[in-house]
Amino acid sequence: MNSQLPVIYKYLSSREYLKDYYRLRKEYDPGFSHSYICYRLGQRNSKSYFANVLAGIKPVTQEFINRFIELLELNADEAKYFRALVNYSQTYNPREKEYYFEQMLQRNTANSRLLTANEYAFYKEWHHSVIRALLDIHDFSGDYKKLAALVVPPITPAQARKSIVLLEKLNLIKKNERGIFKPTDKTIKTEDYVNDELIKHFQLHFLEVAKTTLLDNSDQPKDFSTNSLSISEEGLKKIQARLQKFREEIRALVHNDVEPADRVYQLDIQLFPNSRLPADKAAQASGGRNAKP
């Protein structure tokens, strides 16, 4: 691939990759226009197909994936990554998304790797973070069956063993002066640790755990609430600012808690749209989020 063009392995969005490819190639190839691209893709009577793909209006079908691969002059490995990238970007099925994400990681080259195998392993399974938190309140003596039994929902002793090995490799736990594994820090700030796409997968797993816990009839204290809100853009910004402040306060509270911990809880906060924005406001929101310096 031309060195002036973007490295595909650094992308987790097919639209962002295509936008950057178009911009960079046009700098040295002025004839690489939207009209030319549509022509090469077999859309001779349309000049808007490529623009609609970049805007997320038009999906890229399997046939058009093949045409894009030829247009972009991708080699065999890049083509496989691009195929997985497009499918990953377009599916909303959690299982399919995880499948294509794993394919992308397998195709990734060493020089462009987005994360290590151990980092991916940590965020792929929800119980690793729970085991880490449990070690803060229980002295683990090597009894994996007992450790696994403390987790809700339950996991196997084999899963508990793998968690301990992985957490030690990532330096998220280490043995203290008594030879007991304890967390190296009270909290983990994930945004400093790994990319946003992997965090989405991690959150999806915990949403599944939340459903299981909601249906559980045990007497364990729990608090679930649901609110549907009608708000303005300014009101949304204020709520987002309050949520950010609240998350920071929670982290500080946990960090400064002087009482001995005796339980592990998962705190998930979701704020997501239940209605579509008018077209003009949606375009403004998308443009602001994806703008590049």
Image: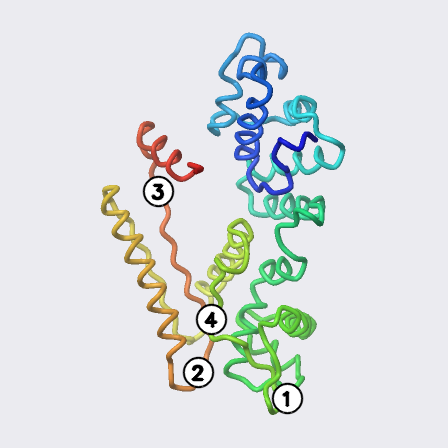
Along the polypeptide, which appears first: circle 4 or circle 1?
A: 1
Residue under numbered circle 4: 187
Query: Quick check: marks 3 and 2 in contact, CB under 8 Å?
Result: no
- Marks 3/4: CA distance? 32 Å
Along the polypeptide, which appears first: circle 3 or circle 1?
A: 1
Q: In front: 224, or 234?
A: 234
Residue under numbered circle 1: 179
Along the polypeptide, which appears first: circle 3 or circle 4?
A: 4
Q: Is residue 101 above or below residue 163?
A: above
- Marks 3/1: CA distance? 50 Å
Residue under numbered circle 3: 274
Q: Secondary structure at mark 1?
A: loop
In the rendered view, does 250 fall on the left or right side of 232? right
Query: Quick check: marks 1 and 2 in contact, CB under 8 Å?
Result: no
- Marks 2/4: CA distance? 13 Å
Query: Quick check: marks 3 and 1 in contact, CB under 8 Å?
Result: no
In the picture, residue 79 is in which quadrant?
top right
Q: Amino acid at mark 4?
A: Thr
Along the polypeptide, which appears first: circle 1 or circle 2?
A: 1
Residue 37: x %, y % from top left: 58, 17
Q: Secondary structure at mark 3?
A: loop
Along the polypeptide, which appears first: circle 2 or circle 4?
A: 4
Residue under numbered circle 2: 261
In the rendered view, does 255 fall on the left or right side of 204? left
Residue 129: x %, y % from top left: 54, 68
Q: Secondary structure at mark 4?
A: loop
Q: Amino acid at mark 2?
A: Ala
| Residue beneath the point at 53% across and 17% down | 34
Residue 222: mark in rendering: none
- Marks 3/2: CA distance? 37 Å
| Residue beneath the point at 61% across and 72% down | 171
- Marks 4/1: CA distance? 21 Å
